Image (spheres, helix red, strand yellow):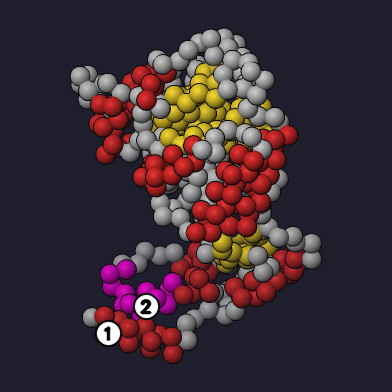
Amino acid sequence: MRLLHTGDWHVGKTLARHSRIAEAREVLSELVDIAAAERADAVLVAGDIFDQLSPSPDAEAVVYDALLEFERREIPVVVISGNHDHAHRWRALERLLARFAIHVVPEPRRPEAGGIVEIRARDGSPSLQVAVLPWVPINRLVAARELLGLAEQPFQTYATEMARILGALCQGFDHTKCNVLAAHLFVSGATVAGSERALSIGDLYAVAPQAIPVSPQYVALGHVHKAQRVPGVAVPARYSGSLLQLDFGEVDQVKSVVIVDLEPGKPAEVREVPISGGRRLRDVRGTLEQLAEYAAGVDDDFLRVVLECEALQPGLGDAVRELLPNALQVTLDYPRQEVERELIDLKELTTRDLFSRYYRGRHASEPEKELLDLLDQLVDEVA
């Protein structure tokens, strides 16, 4: 069996209010082509298909077009929901998508009741069993453990209960077949990209590597946006990472998908295939003159720019954006910044003062009097 492991598509995510729908369509088209070229027997999407619980129609169109293209290429797909996905929305589509060989698992289930999805290989060799665990928020943990028959055991920490749930799921494996565990969770020791939602990545939701059962041949993980093998897990376990560089915390990351070759009773063979689509994110630093030289050869990368200047001057941010239209963030680095970093009690500043400080940091110039007068008017109306 050959499996393509992907996840964390985050379709619908914006960057500095810039839509990335076109990029999402591009990389998902590339993903379909990779699956077809690799002759994958199945594609496993490990959660966070959308970026928002209520995605836009454009985001939905991109995702459903990609899923239907997998069906057109006769490649089955297994989809689990992540913390960015609305489980009930996916549940409503579950039976419809099943007609297109798209197996959706939006919530935890017992192994015999959909917690294990079985996919047959193209060549008739032993089939693939995927034990699936979508994202389990803390407020759904009790229901998940009861569903899997663990209610009689004393309730402990999130990490301990998740270990029990994972073990219960994998007990349903038939070891004459290929066995994979797919889960959307955070395993301690994984290196985060910086673009993840902080609350769902911290200690509260951390699961120890030793909690991952040893019975699966491969563990396909979603939730962390940096592609990596997870240290400390006894079997091959990987985060496939996001398909796009989602924000500037991922500047140096190469995006990829994972190809997994499986035979019953043998260790999985794992390799990464890079993704070339989407616009890259880049950090740029220099004076206006240096940025002007850089602009001559710039492509369509999104830029985070640090302008080195001698002093704060009106219009510097606009000058940078004129040179580099793809600059999404512009920060000024000038000597006076160190002097201005004195401790200030913000409670002592007026609304007008606070806004002026914000405006100077954002636009590298003082706000016009008309703008400040409008601010005062709005504050008076609200008060």
Label 2, label 1: how far apart the Cα atoms are: 18 Å
Q: Which mark is residue 110?
A: none
Instruction: Identify residue type, mark 1.
Output: Glu
Q: Position of residue 44 (x, y in %)?
A: 55, 33
Instruction: Specify whether residue 231 is in view.
Output: no
Residue drawn at (62%, 57%) of the image: 22
Q: Is residue 329 above or below residue 121?
A: below
Q: Between 341 and 258, which is closer to the camera in this rendering?
A: 258
Q: Between 351 and 37, which is closer to the camera in this rendering?
A: 37
- Quarter assignment of residue 67: top right
Q: Position of residue 1 (x, y in %)?
A: 62, 21
Residue drawn at (56%, 18%) of the image: 127
Instruction: Identify residue type, mark 2.
Output: Asp
Which residue is situated farthest in the front direction here? 99
| Element on which disc 2 rests | helix
Q: Per the image, is 347 magenta?
A: yes
Q: Residues within 10 Å of mark 2 (few under 14, many from 20)?
A: few
Q: Who comes first in sequence, dot 2 or dot 1?
A: 2
- Looking at the rendering, the stretch of residues picked out in magenta corresponds to 346-358
Q: Per the image, is 126 magenta?
A: no
Q: Is residue 358 above or below residue 47?
A: below
- Give the main secondary structure, helix, strand or loop, of the magenta stretch: helix
Q: Is residue 299 above or below residue 31?
A: below
Q: Between 319 and 185, which is closer to the camera in this rendering?
A: 185
Residue drawn at (57%, 9%) of the image: 265
Q: Position of residue 238 (x, y in %)?
A: 55, 29
- Quarter assignment of residue 353: bottom left
Which residue bears the numbered disc 2? 353
Which residue bears the numbered disc 1? 381
